[in-house]
Amino acid sequence: MIDVRRAVAGSVVFGLLVVGGCSGEDEPGTPVELPSLSPSVEQPSEARFEPSPAPERPAEGWPEEQSSAEVTPEEVARAWFDAYNDALLSGDTTRMRAMFIEGCGTCEALADQVERFYGAGGGMRFAETPYTPSNFEVMNADAESTTLSFDLAIAAGESASSSDAEVVTFDAEQERWAIAIRERSGRLLLEQIGEIQ
């Protein structure tokens, strides 16, 4: 039996990216195109899991919308997990997608998987906050990018990949992940993310 939760996150392995990253490097000063703020997934009438509403943007904005001079890579990493957790429970990946550089395959795969689950009437439920990062350490840093490693607590829960798929339960886990964050057009954006193998 396939552990559907691991299909969302565990299939994306961070290849100890320390220098490189995703393809599609923009020229310096090129504006980053943000996705529209409309919901990224339409819910079928026979949804397996009732999605939670996506949170509304706070009046002061999201942390990741601040300039790279006003926010740290760790704050952006934590904000990304807030966005990912919200997407896992709501099916709306809009905020998640606004936080990564175009061409980041792992980032794209995580968002696509959430959309497929909810688009097919599936979804996820967790006993507590789905993913909680802690114990951040700098693996590599230069003027344009930072790579952090961190512990990731993954909550117990259940998932189904579609409205007619079997519900799969999973236990809580603790893993070590890494995230590469790059400055692009005055903002810090994800370049790569995944479990360290």
Image: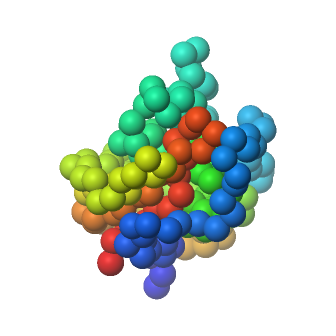
Q: Position of residue 25 (x, y in %)?
A: 66, 60
In the displayed structure, does residue 157 sit left or right of residue 66? left
Please state which of residues 5 and 33 is positioned toward the viewer in this rendering.
33
For the C terminus, which image quadrant? bottom left
Residue visible at 66% across and 47% down in the picture: 28
Left or right position of 131 against 125: left
The location of residue 55, given as percent across then percent down, is: 57, 30
Where is 192 relative to 36, above or below?
A: below
Residue 25 in view: yes
Indicate the quadrant where residue 140 lies.
bottom left
Going by the picture, which residue comes out furthest to the top? 59
- Residue 78 seen from this side: no
In the rendering, at what x and y percent does residue 125 appear? 46, 52
**Residue nearer the viewer, 101 or 56:** 101
Q: Residue furthest bottom?
A: 1
Judge whether 192 appears above or below 15 on screen. above
Q: Residue at x 53, y 57 (%)?
A: 191
* Labels in figure, total: 0
**Residue 30, image x, y percentages:** 73, 44
Decide: is 153 above or below 94.
Answer: below
Left or right position of 41 against 77: right
Q: Residue at x 62, y 53 (%)?
A: 101
Residue 37 higher or lower than 165, as above or below: above
As drawn, which residue projects farthest toward the left? 135
Between 157 and 153, which is closer to the camera in this rendering? 153
Q: Residue at x 48, y 75 (%)?
A: 11
64 or 130, which lies in front?
64
